[in-house]
Image (cartoon, rainbow, N blue to C red):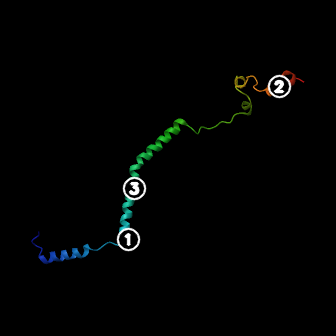
């Protein structure tokens, strides 16, 4: 300890400390301290997430640059819409004919309706 201090000044300091040590801060001070701590925590969290957000935005931009999903649509001329590419109609007709049911009739009514004397006038 310091030799210059006497016992009375030390007793006064202890008495002052004991008197002020029991004081509680006002509720407004606690609210401000908590608000400052929360803001600081939010800023720190945002700074930690910022590189991930930048990386995600960059990958989306790269995907848009490569895939180009929003390419401009050029309208077709009316004459081109009505024409079919070569072989299209032959292929669709062949597919239609191959898909037809050519099995013999299974009921007596169907056999009667398909009889030549009934179909010809």
- Location of the N terminus by quadrant is bottom left
Q: Which residue is mark 2?
A: 112
Residue 58 is left or right of residue 98, and the answer is: left
Task: Kindly tell me whether residue 19 is visible in this rendering.
Answer: yes
* Residue that lies at the very extreme toward the left in this rendered image: 3
- Comparing 112 with 24, the one in front is 112
- Give the crowd class for mark 1: few <14, some 14-19, many >=20 residues within 10 Å: few
Q: Which residue is mark 1?
A: 28
C-alpha distance separating marks 3 and 2: 87 Å
Give the structural element (helix, strand or loop) at label 3. helix
Give the structural element (helix, strand or loop) at label 1. helix
The quarter holding residue 33 reads bottom left
- Residue at the spot x=15%, y=75% of the render? 10
Mark 3 vs mark 2: give the one in front.
2
- Give the crowd class for mark 2: few <14, some 14-19, many >=20 residues within 10 Å: few
- Give the crowd class for mark 3: few <14, some 14-19, many >=20 residues within 10 Å: few
**Which of the two labelled residues, at mark 1 and mark 3, occupies the earlier sequence position?**
1
Residue 70 is left or right of residue 92, and the answer is: left
Label total for image: 3
* Residue that lies at the very extreme toward the top in this rendered image: 116
**Which of the two labelled residues, at mark 2 and mark 1, occupies the earlier sequence position?**
1
- Residue at the spot x=68%, y=36% of the render? 75
Q: Which residue is mark 3?
A: 43
Give the structural element (helix, strand or loop) at label 2. helix
x and y percentages locating residue 20 in the rendered image: 25, 74
x and y percentages locating residue 8 in the rendered image: 14, 78
Residue 95 is left or right of residue 40, and the answer is: right
């Amino acid at each position: 300890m310091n030799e210059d201090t006497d016992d009375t000044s030390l007793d006064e300091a202890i008495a002052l400390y004991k008197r002020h040590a029991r004081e509680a801060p006002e509720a407004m001070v606690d609210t401000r301290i908590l608000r400052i701590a929360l803001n600081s925590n939010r800023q720190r969290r945002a700074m930690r997430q910022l590189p991930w957000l930048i990386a995600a935005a960059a990958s989306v931009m790269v995907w848009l640059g490569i895939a180009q999903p929003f390419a401009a649509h050029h309208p077709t001329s009316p004459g081109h819409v009505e024409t079919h590419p070569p072989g299209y109609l032959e292929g669709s007709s062949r597919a239609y004919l191959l898909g037809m049911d050519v099995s013999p009739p299974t009921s007596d009514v169907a056999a009667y309706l398909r009889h030549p004397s009934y179909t010809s006038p």
